[in-house]
Amino acid sequence: MEAMLGELVTLLLMAFALGMDAFSVGLGMGMFRLTMRQIMKIGIMIGIFHVWMPLVGMIAGRYLSEQFGSLASYLGGGLLILLGVQMIYSSLKTEEESLIAPVGKGLIFFAFGVSLDSFSAGLSLGIYGAKTLLVLISFGVAATALTWAGLMLGRRVQGWLGHYSEALGGGILLAFGLKLLLPF
């Protein structure tokens, strides 16, 4: 029971960390005049991609784990470290990226882009044999809720929190990657 609780807490923290990327993007996007219907659609689409992408990553991770054993474990920890460093680095960049309009095909591309990091996390979790349903529900719910929170907050404030939230998420993933690679 204690091991399952520990795994649940770990997955919820990872889901939060990955969802912070969607939150920070939502903050910026929320400053555009979006209707509540658009906000709901954006959150749901990002949530769907935060389920689909880690599922594909977990399947690939399980395959790698079966084929390469302990080497795959180091790969999984390394991927989390790289993902965390990349999120921290991207939060420090000052240039503004062009935003894809979050409607129609643009929404699909947007959700895919925001969810790419969850593929890498899914790959790592697949290598470590995490419980698939628990991962997918955690990631999907966290991404949807944090996207909605970012969009709603973005409607009311300027982008002062966006970069910090992505750096926080990157720091959490970096810590998990180090924990997997280094015996504590």
Image: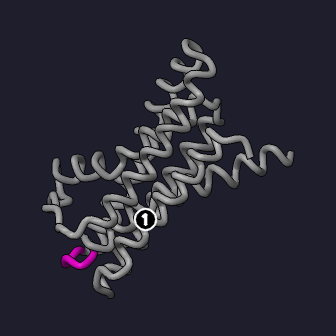
Question: Residue drawn 57% across and 51% down?
Answer: 138
Residue 178 visible here: yes
Q: How many marks?
A: 1
168 vs 104, left or right, is right
Question: Residue drawn 71% across and 46% down?
Answer: 7
Colouring scheme, one of rainbow, by chain, secondary structure, one colour? one colour
Q: Which residues are magenta?
A: 30-34
Question: Residue drawn 51% across and 26% down?
Answer: 61
Asked whether residue 11 is drawn in magenta, I would say no
Q: Nearer the viewer, residue 90 or 141?
A: 90
Q: Amino acid at mark 1?
A: Ala
Asked whether residue 31 is drawn in magenta, I would say yes
The residue at the far right in this view is 1
Residue 41 visible here: no
166 vs 95, left or right, is right
Q: Give SS at disc 1.
A: helix
Helix, strand or loop: magenta stretch: loop
